[in-house]
Image (cartoon, grey):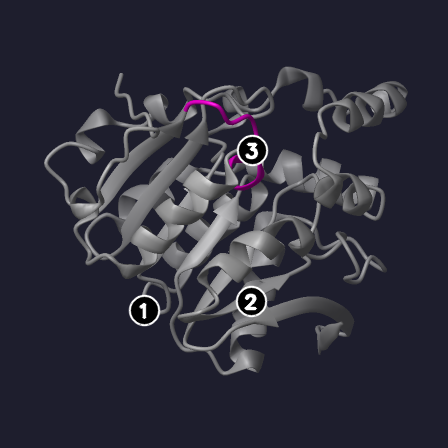
């Protein structure tokens, strides 16, 4: 177990491999752990890092710092402590929002973002999860638990602060992600990856983005994985890992990525 102290709190992280750095950011239902196989799959050419965000896994839960801005500051300080000047960021759900917010805040430090199961506004997140009344908390947690199909997620979900889950979800729901995306289009590479069977984040959420962002641009692309739910990196691990390798190794032109027969892509 590796850890650093940031803003007076312990931040747990793990790192594998050698080569160019890559940072992985988890979502609401787990921690760094569900990235382990994905990290290993690209660790032959990359130094992969994954940290537990405040309130999750083995990172600090002593005070509320669970909004997107808090997590952007955490990522910035973590990369500084690791001596990393620039890195691709692979973010899932909450982590995808944080990755985009971080890239918009520090455009010189992130040139490639893979945003997985990206929430685009409050309408994209299951309404079952955005009812924040105290009376619904027990039933909400039970509903979340029923959605977990992977042991890598189930074990770590029990460690997560319920306050961190709820507060970070509300922060993402209120976050203006489209403005951040638009600010990145001239300088960064953005690939969104979505499970077509996702029942936590609407798989059609990226259709709410301006289609012109995805047309006649080589640095922005959407890919849908037909057999995946909320965790494409676990639901279709082999296909996802192949896609990730190609994404990290390709030039800034995402249309040079070869679409394999088993991948499925769609537009509105």
Give the quadrant of the C terminus. Answer: top left
Q: Which residue is mark 3?
A: 235
Residue 231 covered by magenta stretch: yes
- What distance separates the C-alpha of mark 2 from that of mark 1? 19 Å
Horizontal side of 266 relative to 157 (left or right) equals: left
**Identity of the residue drawn at 78% across and 39% down:** 154
Q: Which residue is mark 2?
A: 49
Magenta segment's dominant SS is: loop
Nearest-to-viewer mark from 3 and 1 = 3
Point out the tag, 2 or 3, that comes first from the N-terminus. Answer: 2
Q: Is residue 8 visible?
A: yes
Given residues 266 and 161, the one toward you in this image is 266
Name the spot of residue 104 as percent of width and height, x first: 37, 55
Query: Callout 1: few (<14), some (14-19), or many (20+) C-alpha neighbours within 10 Å?
Result: few
**Identity of the residue drawn at 28% across and 35% down:** 260
Q: Is residue 133 visible?
A: no
Image quadrant in which you'd find residue 214: top left
Over which residues does the magenta segment extend? 226-234
Given residues 79 and 265, the one toward you in this image is 265
- What distance separates the C-alpha of mark 2 from that of mark 3? 21 Å
Point out the tag, 2 or 1, that comes first from the N-terminus. Answer: 2
Nearest-to-viewer mark from 2 and 3 = 3
Name the spot of residue 53 as percent of width and height, x first: 67, 56
SS at mark 2 in the image: strand
SS at mark 1 in the image: loop
Q: Which residue is mark 1?
A: 108
Mark 2–mark 3 contact, CB under 8 Å?
A: no
Query: Callout 3: few (<14), some (14-19), or many (20+) C-alpha neighbours within 10 Å?
Result: some
């Amino acid at each position: 177990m590796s850890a650093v102290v940031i803003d007076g709190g312990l931040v747990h992280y793990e790192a594998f491999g050698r080569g160019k750095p890559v940072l992985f950011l988890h979502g609401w239902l787990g921690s760094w752990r569900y990235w382990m196989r994905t990290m290993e799959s690209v660790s032959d050419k990359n130094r992969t890092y994954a940290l537990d965000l405040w309130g999750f896994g083995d990172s600090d839960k002593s005070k509320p710092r669970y909004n997107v801005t808090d997590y952007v500051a955490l990522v910035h300080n973590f990369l500084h402590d690791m001596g990393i000047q620039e890195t691709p960021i692979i973010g899932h759900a909450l982590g995808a929002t944080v990755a985009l917010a971080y890239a918009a805040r520090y455009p010189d430090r992130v040139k490639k973002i893979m945003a997985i199961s990206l929430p685009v506004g409050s309408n994209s997140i299951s309404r079952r999860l955005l009812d924040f009344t105290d009376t619904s908390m027990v039933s909400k947690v039970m509903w979340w638990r029923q959605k977990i199909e992977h042991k890598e997620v189930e074990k770590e979900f029990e460690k997560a602060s319920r306050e961190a889950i709820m507060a970070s979800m509300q922060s993402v729901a209120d976050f203006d992600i489209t403005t951040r995306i638009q600010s990145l289009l001239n300088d960064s590479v953005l690939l969104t990856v979505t499970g077509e069977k996702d029942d936590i984040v609407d798989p059609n959420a990226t259709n709410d983005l301006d289609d012109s962002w995805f047309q006649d641009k080589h640095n922005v692309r959407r890919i849908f994985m037909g057999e995946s739910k909320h965790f494409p990196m676990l639901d279709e691990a082999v296909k996802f890992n192949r896609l990730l390798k190609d994404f990290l190794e390709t030039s800034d032109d995402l249309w040079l990525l070869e679409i394999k027969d088993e991948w499925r892509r769609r537009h509105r």
